Amino acid sequence: MVVVMRAGATQEQVEGVIGTVHKLGFQAHPIYGVNLTVIAVVGDGTHAHLETFELLDGVDHVTPIDKPYKLAARRPEVSGTTQIRVGDALFGGEKLVIIAGPCAVESEDSLQEVARGVRAAGAAMLRGGAYKPRTSPYTFQGMREAGLALLKMASQRTGLPFVTEVMDTRTVELVARYADMLQIGARNMQNFPLLSEVGAIGRPVLLKRGLSSTIEDLLMAAEYIMSTGNADIVLCERGIRTFETATRNTLDLSAVPVLKRYTHLPVIVDPSHGTGHSWIVPAMAKAAVACGADGLMIEVHQAPEMAASDGPQSLTIGEFSTLMQQLDPVAGAIGRRIL
Ligand code: PEP
Ligand code: MN
């Protein structure tokens, strides 16, 4: 980091800062300019002391140079995306991973129908919520463990691995007994005890961007999980809150190339929660593929008008199938594939 001294800072103040730098075990490299003095602070772990330096006498401000996330950061000597395997699905390869399924698990029959339909259309993973984070406590909260059992059954019958959300540290072990991949939802992206718990359980994690989170917040959340020793993380852009009301959220597709620049982790896009309207989903899914996403998560329901949650943003099985056909040439145009 660089400590910038105030104009007119005294030599005593500069020496005070240098003394603190040494006391913390770092090296100090002062540069005496005509108007300002700056002190480069070099060493491992300077980030943790940013506020200490800001408070020292004569300091104007402190600028960090490197990123606060280390494990999630792209290493300059390694290009490409880290590949993460979940069953037969491989994130970060030439073939994009399309995850599809209902917002919530509702019944054995409906889940079977959707699972079979999306597999026939070319999806590589099944999704479905058993524990649902609903804004209202009066709406459908999910089938809980019974839903996990139905997901497992559908997964075994179709051969598709599945991802499902875990909302609470108390159910991490239970959900991990069933699921191939654990989803941390947008509302829990900064639930730090939950991040540590899913890290420790050692199952691949799908980490969704928080509703009001910056890209750096998302990467710091990934860092939390990675710091527990679990490196199998896939990031998901799912839209953020803005002043716009035409869509449920504003799908920030620029997050895809930005994340690709700063992290080696695979990045997928959820155009269903990102837009809230099924008629927008195909256009944004194509745009997500075109801008370099490693996969998509799409809500599909056998009868969206009857869905217990998120019907308006769910594609029918037929619509999903058509979309998969349309996505393939888009992926082909950038050297990747869907089918
Ligand atoms: C979901 O994928 O089921 C979900 C609730 O999404 P989000 O956390 O992005 O709102
Ligand atoms: Mn949903």
Image (spheres, rainbow, N blue to C red):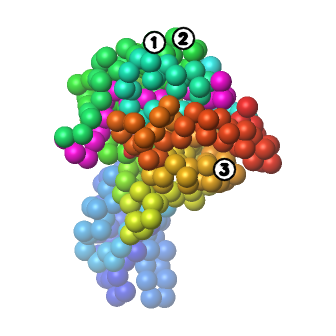
Give the Cα distance between marks 1 and 3: 31 Å
Q: Position of residue 154 (x, y in %)?
A: 49, 16
Label pair 2/1, CB-CB below 8 angstroms: yes
**Mark 1 residue type:** Met
Q: Is residue 119 visible?
A: yes
The image quarter containing residue 79 is top right
Q: Residues within 10 Å of mark 2 (few under 14, many from 20)?
A: few
Q: Is residue 172 left or right of residue 316?
A: left
Q: Position of residue 161 (x, y in %)?
A: 53, 20
Residue position for label 3: 286
What span is in magenta? 120-137
Q: Residues within 10 Å of mark 3 (few under 14, many from 20)?
A: many
Residue position for label 2: 157
Label pair 2/3, CB-CB below 8 angstroms: no
Residue position for label 1: 153
Q: Nearer the viewer, residue 203 or 29?
A: 203
Q: Nearer the viewer, residue 23 or 166?
A: 166
